[in-house]
Image (cartoon, rainbow, N blue to C red):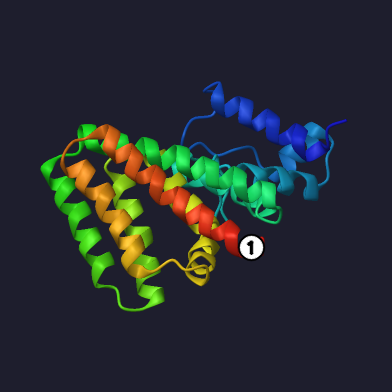
């Protein structure tokens, strides 16, 4: 049996997707929703909060909630809770590693096929920042920026949001891999192989370089955690 807040949220969501409520429209007041559904204020507020998390509503203190347009970031943020739960179990970590590999191998191929000269220059700059990093914190941040810059070449907000989220969720891998023997020089060399393949417009080589890089990260992670 559905909870009352779910009934209210589903009703409002249907109004939004059917076009009966447009972007910027005010939704019915809390009192009106309470009367319409025979619900308490807490149920109505829980429904509105659920829609805010989905990016379908925006609400400011003292103002009526209005319909908003969801973004790629709000879509991905909805996955954060389940992702954190998955990270608590070894099989969940493997699922996320596989998801990241599938995404980034595809992004490497896409970049090799479609990157502009400006894209290549931006990726080369990110690679150079990674090379110049002299401590673990800086190297980790430039590592993430290299991968994010690669994702940006796709010009797809969903890919960039997923890339950032997966890299953040699996950030622990960098620390564990370092303890297992990964070096700045080794990781940089893997990044350079990815860049060189993309700059050469070689999609097959780009896919292979990314796959080897992520396989190396995963292998070192599991070597250390299963000791």
Q: Nearer the viewer, residue 200 or 168?
A: 200
The quarter of the displayed image where residue 47 is located: top right
Q: Nearer the viewer, residue 105 or 83?
A: 105
Residue 58 visible from this viewpoint: no
- Residue at the far bottom in the pictured view: 135
Name the element at disc 1. helix
Horizontal placement of 157 versus 83: left or right? left
Horizontal placement of 90 versus 67: left or right? right
- Residue at image coords 29%, 51%: 149
The image quadrant where one finds the C terminus is bottom right
- Residue at image coords 25%, 67%: 131
Horizontal placement of 185 versus 79: left or right? left
Instruction: Report x, y in % for residue 80.
Output: 60, 51
- Whether residue 18 is situated above or below residue 35 in the rendered picture: above
Q: Which residue is mark 1?
A: 225
- Residue at image coords 83%, 32%: 2
Instruction: Report x, y in % for residue 60.
Output: 54, 56
Q: Nearer the viewer, residue 82 or 150?
A: 150
Instruction: Report x, y in % for residue 17.
Output: 55, 25
Question: Would you call the spot at circle 1 few (<14 residues within 10 Å), some (14-19), or many (20 or more)?
Answer: few
- Residue at image coords 30%, 62%: 188
The image quadrant where one finds the N terminus is top right
Instruction: Report x, y in % for residue 15.
Output: 60, 26
The quarter of the displayed image where residue 154 is located: top left
- Whether residue 203 is situated above or below residue 62 in the rendered picture: above
Residue 145 visible from this viewpoint: yes
- Whether residue 36 is situated above or below residue 159 in the rendered picture: above
Q: Nearer the viewer, residue 44 or 3?
A: 3
């Amino acid at each position: 049996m559905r909870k009352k807040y779910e009934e209210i949220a589903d009703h409002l969501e249907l109004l939004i997707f059917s076009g009966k409520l447009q972007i910027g429209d005010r939704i019915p007041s809390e009192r009106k929703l309470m009367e319409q559904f025979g619900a308490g204020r807490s149920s109505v507020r829980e429904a509105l909060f659920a829609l805010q998390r989905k990016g379908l509503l925006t609400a400011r203190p003292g103002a009526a909630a209005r319909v908003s347009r969801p973004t790629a970031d709000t879509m991905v943020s909805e996955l954060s809770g389940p992702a954190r739960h998955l990270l608590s179990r070894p099989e969940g970590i493997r699922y996320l590693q596989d998801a990241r590999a599938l995404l980034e191998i595809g992004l490497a191929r896409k970049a090799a096929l479609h990157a502009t000269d400006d894209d290549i220059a931006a990726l080369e700059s990110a690679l150079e920042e990674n090379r110049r990093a002299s401590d673990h914190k800086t190297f980790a941040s430039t590592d993430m920026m290299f991968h994010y810059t690669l994702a940006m070449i796709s010009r797809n907000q969903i890919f960039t949001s997923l890339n950032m989220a997966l890299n953040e969720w699996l950030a622990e891998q960098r620390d564990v891999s370092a303890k297992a023997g990964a070096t700045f020089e080794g990781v940089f060399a893997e990044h350079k192989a990815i860049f060189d393949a993309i700059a050469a417009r070689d999609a097959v080589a780009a896919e292979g370089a990314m796959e080897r890089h992520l396989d190396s990260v995963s292998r070192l992670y599991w070597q250390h955690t299963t000791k």
